[in-house]
């Protein structure tokens, strides 16, 4: 049986398939009430060591609670939820999609996050990204689990 690809390989392949200007993967740690960055296309601005506190808001209700992707095609659509929106904009990104990744038991293990120009996430792109994440779920879940275990 061949070895499973490294988490970075799994994440990099998905990043290439999605093709967004900024791409990250975060793992969800409900016990610590944190999201931890497991992969990033921009390590200077968004290092893998980064964390975000988990807050109860419209985003968490949608993505973690209802297991639905969050899509905002303007800065105004996400600035109230993302305190780092100025940095996001400085990278030329004005739209976002966050896709939850679920284990077989329905628990959210993390999110796949892509950001790009304003209006980038058309219904067709959203459907394509969600399909890519779903197709790669069997590789993403163990990669995200391994990444979460490798980082404090």
Image (cartoon, rainbow, N blue to C red):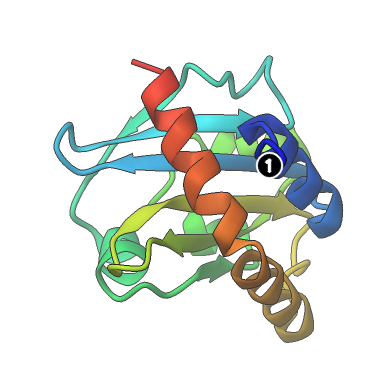
Above or below residue 91? Residue 75 is below
Q: Residue at x 14, y 37 (%)?
A: 31
Camera-side residue: 63 or 2? 2
Give residue 6's position: percent from left, percent from top: 66, 31
Task: Rate crowding at label 1 as few (under 14), some (14 to 19) or many (20 or more) other CA atoms within 10 Å.
Answer: many
Q: Quadrant of residue 17?
A: bottom right
Apparent side of residue 54 relative to residue 38 in the rendered image (left or right): left
Q: Is residue 25 left or right of residue 102?
A: right
Image x and y of residue 62, in percent: 33, 71
Foreground residue among 139 and 53: 139
Query: Which quadrant does the C terminus fall into?
Result: top left
Secondary structure of residue under mark 1: helix
The quarter of the picture where residue 143 lies is top right
Q: Which residue is mark 1?
A: 11
Q: Is residue 126 visible?
A: yes
Residue at 68% from the left image edge and 76% from the top image edge: 131
What is the x, y in percent for residue 2?
A: 72, 40
- Tell me if 148 is positioned left or right of 24 in this view: left
The residue positioned 69% from the left and 51% from the top of the image is: 115
User: Which residue is found at the position 63% from the left and 38% from the top?
Assistant: 88
Question: In which quadrant of the rendered image does the N terminus lie?
Answer: top right
């Amino acid at each position: 049986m061949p070895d499973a690809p490294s988490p970075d390989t799994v994440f990099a392949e998905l990043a290439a398939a999605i093709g967004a200007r900024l791409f990250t993967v975060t793992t969800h740690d409900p016990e610590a009430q944190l999201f931890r960055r497991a992969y990033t296309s921009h390590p200077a601005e968004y290092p893998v060591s980064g964390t975000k506190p988990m807050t109860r808001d419209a985003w968490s209700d949608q993505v973690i609670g209802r297991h639905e992707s969050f899509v905002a095609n303007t800065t105004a659509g996400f600035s109230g939820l993302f305190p780092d929106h100025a940095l996001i904009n400085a990278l030329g990104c004005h739209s976002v999609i966050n896709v939850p990744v679920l284990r077989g038991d329905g628990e959210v293990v993390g999110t796949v996050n892509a950001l790009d120009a304003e209006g980038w996430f058309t219904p067709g792109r959203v459907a394509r990204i969600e399909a890519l994440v779903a197709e790669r779920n069997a590789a993403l879940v163990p990669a995200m689990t391994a990444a979460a275990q490798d980082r404090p």
